[in-house]
Amino acid sequence: MKTLLGGKGANLAEMASIGLSVPPGLTISTEACQEYQLNGKKLPEGLWEEILEGLETVEKDMGAFLGDPSKPLLLSVRSGAAVSFCCMNI
């Protein structure tokens, strides 16, 4: 799993699978990041929709919403991977 998710993503998935309390979130696979880098920094087909779907799930779980001034959702974007979206412009 570590190969597909990277170290942080795999560790979070493992903690959640053994029942530890892990905040809601989403992880983009290292494969998707590699494809992004190899295809001229263009998102793989369908990935943006998956990200939006994951974000919607996090918003519902947290009861907070990205861009909502009365109930703002605060996100932490983490990457230490050799292959990542670190230079992505959306």
Image (cartoon, rainbow, N blue to C red):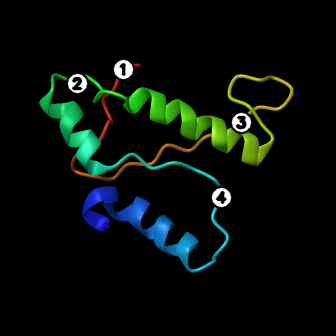
In the image, 9 versus 47, the foreground residue is 47
Tell me what residue is drawn at x 33 percent, y 36 percent: 86
Q: What residue type is labelled 1?
A: Asn
Q: Name the residue under label 3.
A: 73
| Horizontal arrangement in the rendering, residue 11 relative to residue 70 (left or right) | left
Image location (x, y in percent) of residue 26? 51, 48
Q: Where is residue 47 in the image (x, y as percent from the top left)?
A: 38, 32
What residue is at 86 percent from the left and 26 percent from the top? 70
Secondary structure beneath label 4: loop
Mark 4 vs mark 2, CA separation in Å: 29 Å
User: Mark 4 — residue?
Assistant: 23
Tell me whether the residue at label 3 lies in contact with that at label 1, contact meaning CB atoms closer than 8 angstroms.
no
Q: Distance between the residues labelled 3 and 2?
A: 27 Å
Total count of labels: 4
Where residue 41 is drawn, which disc sits there?
2
Task: Quickly name the residue at label 1.
Answer: 89
